[in-house]
Amino acid sequence: MCGIVGAWLPGRDLQAVVASARERLRHRGPDDTGVWADPAAGVALGHTRLAVLDLSQAGHQPMASRCGRYHLVLNGEIYNHLELRRRLPAQGWRGHSDTETLLACFSAWGIESALRASTGMFALGVFDSADRTLYLARDRLGEKPLYYGYAGGAFAFASELKALRCMPGFDASVDRTALASYLRLSYVPGPQTIYAALRKLPMGSWLAVTAGQVESRSTSQPRSYWSALEVAEAAQRNPLQVGDTEAVDGLERVLGEAVAEQLICDVPLGAFLSGGLDSSTIVALMQARSRSPVRTFSIGFSDDAYDESREARRVAAHLGTEHTELIASAEDLLPLVESLPRIYDEPFADPSQLPTCLIAALARRSVTVALSGDGGDELFGGYNRYFIAARNWPRIARVPRVLRRGVAAAVHAVPSDAWERAAGFYSACVPAARQVRNPGEKLSKIADALASEHEEALYQRLIGGPPLPALLAGERGTLAEPALPRLLPASSLALRMMLSDAVSYLPDDVLVKVDRATMAVALEMRVPMLDHRVFEYAWRLPLAMKVRDGTGKWLLRRLLQRYVPAALTERPKMGFAVPLNAWLRGPLRGWAEELLEASRLRREGYFSAPAVQQLWAEQIAGKRRREFVLWRVLMFQSWLAAQGGGDAAG
């Protein structure tokens, strides 16, 4: 894993500029650095290396192809690079790095064909000196980030925005459309970034930039070499006709192969283990392929309502892993809050970023590479909204919308604390497996969803809540929201929601959260569930293999039960949550009130001070739970302060 950066402006020597930008990425790769420049062409590439494969200088980047035509900076791993070497013409290899393999593939097959042949997680920039073309590319499911755009006349790209902000002439204008989307979703959806001048390269795509385009400050549209939407549609047209046992066998084979490939490295390796289905499945497959105990890591909380450490410990003991856990308190998590703008580099408000940062730091004390179970929910129907919405929406839609809006208003009229107390009485009367955490918050979200006018609006409210234009000050950009893909006419709402999450929420929230948290401590994270062959297999299976009897991830459950007794993992889904509601009314109150101070909001010009103050008053009084929308405002405010603040622009 590494950090990459590059810039191109014909007639300018950008080596010193790129070297300076590269230093902003040293946390991603502390083991080695390098810069390559062609002053005559006006192009420079920079790299910071976290050495994982071929720790020698034979893996140093930027790296040139043997023919000298291509110069490459690569962030990530090409898992099948040894297989690719066997397919290439015989040649004398300098080392055994995947970077050298990929360069040889470019030379032999061309850029797009090499990308199609590669299996891995990566973002890259490669300069073709023969054609005077710069190519950018990103892995199929968006595990690794890549930003690009123009700064002071130069075309530039980087793994993180902080490397581009130091480019001479960088335009820091905030994209109002991106801000509106962020306020709804907790993240900035691609291809937007928070800056109007920059874009994210979409997952599964590549971009060619020519000297003529740089001179005219233009770019072409990214081109897809692999499309999740196309794969899902093709899979629906040609589903697998298999029984239950065959389906589990197939998943064990394809996911097991992905895990086996991702175990290859030259440094210590481990895994995150929450004790839930996804991470437990990955660790079980790892342990089955390891001659020694796998190192596993988990975070627990002193607040029992948010603690999964006991379950993780039991799974680790059953599988025989070498397990390390940290029981965290508010005192451990809260100091991280002020560092989040530095780590995430763009407004990002998924509160699970806090424990993710903690577990990354814990794992990095022992290993350099870790595997996680991310992606299981989106591929195998793990979120409750998939089956609850699909089952209930046809009945809800028959009720006149005016009545539904009235019910929603009645729910919101009852203070959140009152709903929490009522839920406490209910919880005392039902089994633990049927209890719901944060019932007041979930009831509020259901009430918002009741007012939806159609399936698209229902989905958007379930993933982000209702639109909040009244919170925005000044010019309000057009809200860009994840849309439900069409797929086939007969495709269910659940499948369409799963696919939309896989191409929006997964790359722009989940994978951003994991990448920034792990790379902040120079830990490489690998995600076997997101091997494109696992994705393709999952989408060829009928929905009943994923959601059955009102429960998601049926297939993963059956696979895991081959390794771990169901009693150790069958429990209500918890996620990686934190007690944000209590923190904002307690230890974070002073920090929040400073960022939300009315005169400050008016001076900065992004949010309506009266609207924000009303939300804050409702939160403090316990009248209505507003912690998540307030967290979005606070994370933007904190990010803005870290950039130097200032009045609204753009």
Image: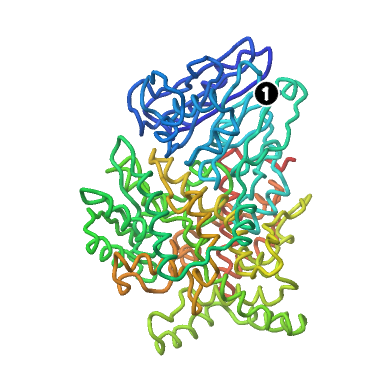
Which residue is more in the foreground, 189 or 384?
384
Residue at the limit of the structure toward the bottom, as seen here: 429
Residue 471 sits above or below residue 572 on the image: above
Name the residue carrying label 1: 154
Q: Nearer the viewer, residue 300 or 269?
A: 269
- Horizontal arrangement in the rendering, residue 61 relative to residue 494 (left or right): left
Residue 244 horizontal/vertical position (percent): 44, 71
What amino acid is found at the position of numbered circle 1 in the picture? Ala
Measured from the top left, where is residue 603 in percent x and y? 70, 46
Q: Is residue 386 above or below residue 524?
A: below
Toward the top, the furthest residue is 40
At a point 33% along the width and 69% down the height, the residue shown is 561
In the rendered structure, the answer to whether residue 372 lies left or right of residue 601 reads left
Q: Along the line of sight, which residue is nearer the eye, 465 or 414?
A: 465
Quadrant in which the C terminus is drawn: top right
- Please say which color scheme the image uses: rainbow
Taking 544 as reference, is 96 left or right? Answer: left
Pinpoint residue 369: horizontal percent, then vertical percent: 35, 42
Q: Residues within 10 Å of mark 1 (few under 14, many from 20)?
A: many
Q: How many marks?
A: 1
The image shows residue 31 at horizontal and vertical percentages of 36, 28
What element does badge 1 sit on?
strand
- Above-or-below relation of 340 to 137: below
Left or right of 476? Residue 133 is: left
Q: Quadrant of the N terminus?
A: top left
Is 222 above or below relative to 517? above
